[in-house]
Amino acid sequence: MKIALPLTSLALCLASSLTLASGTHCTAPVADWQPRENLQRKLENDGYSVHRIKVDDGCYEVKATDRAGKHLEIKYDPKSFAPLKIEDD
């Protein structure tokens, strides 16, 4: 019994890590999504130049350039607009 709890905890941690490593997926129902125009407006107000917004794995995927000219690809939760993953090009 003393070994079972740590092994269970380890298994849960590994499962969580594998889920995160496999990619970013959003699960909010489409009815709860905010319009992509609102995300574009928010990003432009924050100084980004938005090139494209598309849906990928249930998330909004944005290609944009920041004020410094860096090209970015960012995944956002479509319900909360929380950034989930940021990649430099």
Image (tube, rainbow, N blue to C red):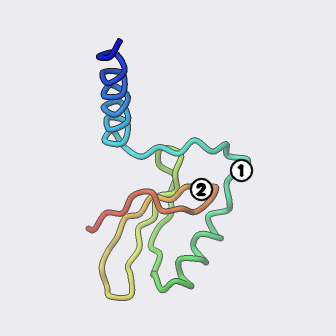
In the depicted structure, whether residue 39 falls above or below residue 30: below
Residue 32 is left or right of residue 67, and the answer is right
Kind of residue at badge 1: Asp
Kind of residue at badge 2: Pro
Front residue of this view, candidates 52 and 78: 78
Give the residue at x 67% y 46%: 30
Dividing the picture into quarters, in which one does residue 51 lie? Answer: bottom left
Name the residue at the right extreme: 31
Residue that mark 1 sits on: 32
Is there CB contact under 8 Å for labels 2 and 1?
yes
**x then y, percent, for residue 33:** 67, 54
**x then y, percent, for residue 41:** 61, 78
Quarter of the image for the C terminus: give it.
bottom left
Dividing the picture into quarters, in which one does residue 9 lie? Answer: top left
Residue 32 is left or right of residue 27, and the answer is right
Give the residue at x 48% y 62%: 83
Q: Earlier in the sequence, mark 2 or mark 1?
A: 1
Residue 45 is left or right of residue 11, and the answer is right
Q: Residues within 10 Å of mark 2 (few under 14, many from 20)?
A: many
Front residue of this view, candidates 69 and 84: 84
Residue that mark 2 sits on: 78
Q: Is mark 1 on a helix, strand or loop?
A: helix
Q: Is mark 2 on a helix, strand or loop?
A: loop
Label drawn at residue 50? none
Name the residue at the front extreme: 2
Give the residue at x 29% y 16%: 3
**x then y, percent, for residue 79:** 64, 55
In the depicted structure, whether residue 62 falls above or below residue 6: below
